[in-house]
Amino acid sequence: MPPSALRDRKRERTRRALLEAAVDMFEARGYEATTVADIAAAAEVGTRTFFNYFESKEELLFPQPDDRVHAAVHAIATRRPDERPVEVLLRALRAAGDNPGDHLGDTLPARIAVLRAQVSRTVPAVSGRGAHAQLLAQQEIARHLRVAFPEELDEVGAAALVGAVVGAVSGALTVLFSGRHAIEDGERLQRKIRETTSRVLAPWLAGPPTRETRPLPVEARN
C-alpha cells in the first residue's frame, strides 16, 4: 500500500476515534461538561492533534455537513416521472439519515444526530452553527429543485417548499425528543413524524398549483 494511502487510513482511524470518544462522553457526562482535553485523552491523542481534525467541540456534532445536500441532489436527479417535489425531498431526508426514527439506532451517525438535536436546544453555539448549516443546505437544495421542476416551482416556491419540509421535520423532531412529548419507540416516532409532516405539507402532497394558476401577488395587481 502506498505511504499516502497508509496516512489516509491512519487519519481516518484517528478522526473516528475522536468522534467515538466525544459521543461516548457527551452521552455519559453531557456536552457542556466534556472538554476538548477530555475527548483527546479518551482517544489517546494530544489536544493539538484534536485541532488538526476539528476546529472546535461543536464541530464534532457536524462531522459531515453536506450529507443532506448530497442526498437531496441525488434524489432530485434520480426522481421518478410521477414523483412530486415534496416526495423527492422526503425521500432525500430518509436517504441522508434524517428520518427521526433512524436516530434511535446505535450507529455513530445516528447517535450524533440525536445529540445534535438535544444539544441544539440548550447550547447557543451549537444551535447557531446548526441554523447556519441548515440555511446553506436549504439554499443549495432549493436551487436544484427549482431546476428540476421549472413548471411547478419558481425561486420563491422552491425555497418555501424546502423550508417547509426541513422545518416540519426539524421542529417535530425537537419536540418529540424532549420533555413530556419524548418518544423512545422507533416505530411510534416514525409514525408520529409522518402524521405531523403530512398535515403541514398537505397542500404540497396533494399537488401545488402551477405558477400560471397561482394568484398574483398584491404588488402585481396594482
Image (cartoon, rainbow, N blue to C red):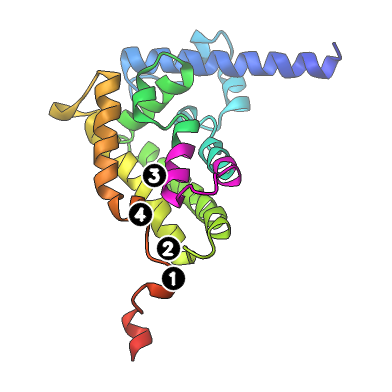
Query: Which residue is identified by label 3?
Result: 128
Marks 1 and 2 close (CB-CB < 8 Å) = yes
What span is colored magenta in the figure? 74-92
Q: Considering only vertical position in the picture, is 197 above or below 135?
A: above
Q: Quadrant of residue 73?
A: top right
Disc 1: CA contacts within 10 A as few (<14), some (14-19) or many (>=20) = some
Name the N-terminal-most of marks 2 and 3: 3
The amino acid on which the numbered mark 3 sits, given as a three-letter code, is Gly
Amino acid carrying mark 2 in the image: Gly
Pointer 2: what residue? 157
In this view, the residue in front, 3 or 112, is: 112
- Which image quarter: residue 127? top left
Q: In the picture shown, does residue 2 fall above or below 208?
A: above
Task: Decide which of tag 1 and tag 2 comes sooner along the chain.
Answer: 2
- Distance in Å between CA atoms under marks 1 and 3: 34 Å
Callout 4 amino acid = Trp
In front of the other: label 1 or label 2?
Answer: 1
Residue in the image at 31% along x and 45% along y? 168
Residue identified by numbered label 1 = 211
Q: Find disc 4 in the rendering and name its residue.
A: 204
In this view, the residue farthest toward the bottom is 222
CB atoms of marks 4 and 1 within 8 Å: no
Tags 2 and 3 touching, CB below 8 Å: no
The one of 211 and 106 positioned closer to us in this rendering: 211
Q: Is residue 94 visible?
A: yes
